[in-house]
Image (tube, rainbow, N blue to C red):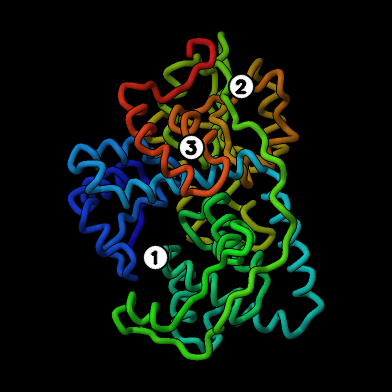
Amino acid sequence: MEFTPTRQAGLDRLHDFVPGAGRAYATGRNFDEMDNVSGLSPYLRHRLVSEPEVLDAVLARHTPAAAEKFIQEVYWRTYWKGWLEMRPSVWAQYRAGLQAALNRVQTETGLRRDWEAACAGETGIDAFDHWSRQLAETGYLHNHARMWVASIWVFTLRLPWELGADFFLRHLLDGDPASNTLGWRWVAGLQTPGKTYLARPDNIARYTRGRFRPEGLAQEAPALDGPPHPPRMDAPAGDAPPRGRVGVLLTEDDLTPDWLLDRVDPAEVAVFDATALRSPLHVSPRVLSFAAGAVQDLEARIGPVTRLATSEAVTDWAAGVEAIVTPHPPMGPAAEALAPVLSEGRTHKLLRAHDRRAWPHATAGFFKFKKRIPDLLRARDGQAELFDPQTA
């Protein structure tokens, strides 16, 4: 499956997928076959295509009941973001755990050998090795394969989960900090305490249609130890757009900013690309190329932008504008790098209505959040994409 980093390519993929978004998706989505998935995740990751656009297109063709499974998958991404926004220290814990694991790799020969073999697809576990190489070669994995890989990584290979999450984030075109980090935590039994995911040979054989039935997998999946969830913060509410000429700062998290540009008077538009900051290690050239192509596509749509490669460059750029407007950057590399740079008084973080409505409901597990999806679907109709606290 090839991914062209343009908004039009994302819209074309959406158009092609919509007919199969109903019962066909529900029936085939767990099979490790690219024909059964939408392939929209790299476009949603960078918001070359937005969640409301996807939901509108699907619901124009299918009833909510018929498209229920796909709609839930769209909201899983939103749920993970909201959950992490209210507990940002979990991202900091992951980053610290990753650095500790990388330090171990430098001193523990056996760990380094096993980690390198897992990343190279040379473990001797045929299914795992296939998916590891597929990820590195294509930048994409079926969601079910991601779960199997994570489970084998943690419970069979007994490698630190943070190294696996980093391996994914370095190579996935749709590498979303929230979905990736919290998904790995869920497999390991840290996200829902005590609940883990065990990769089973018969399950793999069934959903790969017999292509793989790996031997030697772990027979049990004891939950990893970890700190309890931190206290929950309030979900971001979003700032009101300021008056006057402003500098607009975009990140790779939102590269279709029409909803924002229509409501401010931009003196200049800049893009801070934090893709290389996904990992302390080298991020895949394929991932870097996709992000760079998406920024190039942005320029083709809105005109020239100032490209900022470092947080220091952002500081210098910000000194030349009176106020800064930015789409609220969800927790991840961009938000992490910008936090010490952007002063609260001069920076206005605007929030898309989709996020503002959904994120506050990510208070517990997805089952509780899922009950709010019908209300969220109704609320999206006729609502402006931008939430303005002053007019709400």
Q: Is residue 283 visible?
A: no
Local SS, label 2 = strand
Q: Amino acid at mark 1?
A: His
**Point 56% across, 9% down: residue:** 243
Q: Which residue is mark 2?
A: 348
Sequence-wise, which precedes: disc 3 or disc 1?
1
Please rate how many residues cluster around mark 3, counting C-alpha atoms within 10 Å: few if below 14, some from 14 to 19, many from 20: many
Q: Position of residue 298 (x, y in %)?
A: 42, 36
Local SS, label 3 = loop
Please rate how many residues cluster around mark 2, counting C-alpha atoms within 10 Å: few if below 14, some from 14 to 19, many from 20: many
Q: Which residue is mark 1?
A: 142
Count of number-bearing discs: 3
Q: Nearer the viewer, residue 77 or 320?
A: 77
Distance CA(mark 2)–CA(mark 1): 37 Å
Distance CA(mark 3)–CA(mark 1): 23 Å
**Point 79% across, 69% down: residue:** 103
Q: Quadrant of the N terminus?
A: bottom left
